[in-house]
Image (cartoon, rainbow, N blue to C red):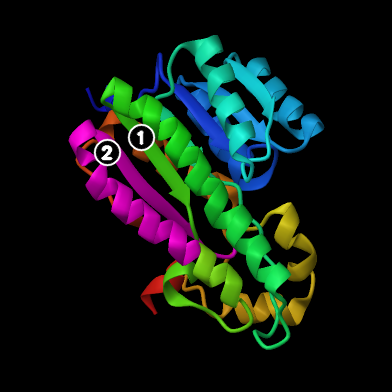
């Protein structure tokens, strides 16, 4: 009984930003739990690699090159997935970008880029996929925000605002779409060890400063999101919606 609560057999998931890092790890986890996975990214080689890994492990994957900041491409993505699988049960909005620096020194272009990638992409995917879920009267949407979307941080204003927007969109849609049996939740990681953060963490002073704020005294790994995303995608979480699940080593409780 308990095992079935976490099974994603016969489910179809769309994972954006799935070519590497957190998105790739979540795509692999969903596939391992039984879901067919549409692997979405802007880079052809990356989506092909993730899809191949899923297939090599006995899973089903559809690689798609999509820029989620462009609505027309998201519409095409959904049409392609529906043509292949006839359904979308799970959406993981994982596309994200970070650019830090003092607020005064930032440009409007920097601001717009953060909003466009981190928030507008989530808007497009949630809206277009959400329409299909409303027709079906069921679905799971899992947004990837950040602990900094709640707590804020110096030198990260645009990032914090964009990720805070993802959290508020999550809460609003959770209320608005509850009548359609659509669960909308957010995962909020902090200091995950990925290709994006690798160069920054090679600076021992920076790494020491980051670890000093994390009670578990280690950086997060992409695999640390695997269990959480499967839980939120599965029937085990059917009575959970509008929530922010922190995966941050205890950073947010200090």
State the residue lying farthest toward the front. Answer: 72
Task: Classify residue 29 as left or right of residue 63.
Answer: left
Q: Which residue is at the front of the view, 20 or 74? A: 74
Residue at the spot x=36%, y=23% of the render? 7
Measured in 3D between alpha carbons, the distance from the residue under mark 2 to the one under mark 1, in whole angstroms, is 9 Å
- Res 32 seen here: yes
Label 2: how many Cα within 10 Å (few below 14, some 14–19, many 20+): some
- Percent across and percent down for residue 174 are 28, 47
- The answer to if 203 sits in the magenta stretch is no
Residue at the spot x=57%, y=47% of the render? 121
- Percent across and percent down for residue 11 are 41, 19
- The answer to if 190 sits in the magenta stretch is yes
Q: Quadrant of the N terminus?
A: top left
In magenta, the rendered stretch is 163-191
Residue at the spot x=58%, y=31% of the render? 28
Precedes in sequence: disc 2 or disc 1 = 1
Q: Secondary structure at mark 1?
A: strand
State the residue lying farthest toward the bottom. Answer: 104
Q: Quadrant of the C terminus?
A: bottom left
Q: Secondary structure at mark 2?
A: helix
Kindly indicate whether the residue at mark 1 contacts the one at mark 2 (C-beta within 8 angstroms): yes
Q: Which residue is at the front of the view, 181 or 113? A: 113
Label 1: how many Cα within 10 Å (few below 14, some 14–19, many 20+): many
Q: Which residue is mark 2?
A: 237
- Percent across and percent down for residue 245 are 37, 55
Q: Which residue is mark 1?
A: 140
- Percent across and percent down for residue 23 are 60, 42
Q: Quadrant of residue 132?
A: top left
């Amino acid at each position: 009984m308990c095992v079935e609560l976490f099974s994603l057999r016969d489910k179809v998931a769309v994972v954006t930003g799935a070519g590497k890092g957190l998105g790739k790890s979540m795509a692999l986890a969903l596939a391992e739990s039984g879901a067919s996975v549409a692997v979405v990214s802007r880079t052809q080689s990356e989506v092909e690699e993730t899809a191949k890994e899923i297939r090599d492990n006995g899973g089903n994957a559809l690689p798609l090159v999509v820029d989620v900041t462009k609505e027309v491409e998201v519409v095409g993505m959904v049409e392609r997935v529906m043509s292949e699988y006839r359904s979308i049960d799970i959406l993981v909005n994982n596309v994200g970008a970070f650019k830090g620096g003092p607020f005064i020194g930032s440009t409007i272009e920097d601001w717009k880029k953060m909003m466009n990638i981190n928030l507008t992409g989530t808007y497009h995917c949630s809206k277009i996929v959400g329409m299909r879920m409303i027709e079906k009267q069921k679905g799971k949407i899992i947004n990837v925000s950040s602990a900094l979307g709640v707590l804020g941080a110096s030198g990260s204003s645009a990032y914090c605002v964009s990720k805070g927007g993802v959290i508020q969109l999550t809460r609003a849609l959770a209320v608005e779409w509850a009548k359609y049996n659509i669960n909308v939740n957010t995962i909020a990681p902090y200091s995950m060890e990925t290709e994006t953060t690798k160069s920054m963490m090679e600076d021992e002073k920076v790494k020491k400063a980051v670890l000093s704020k994390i009670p578990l005294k280690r950086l997060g790994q992409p695999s640390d999101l695997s269990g959480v995303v499967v839980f939120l995608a599965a029937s085990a979480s059917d009575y959970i919606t509008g929530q922010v699940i922190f995966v941050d080593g205890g950073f947010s409780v200090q």
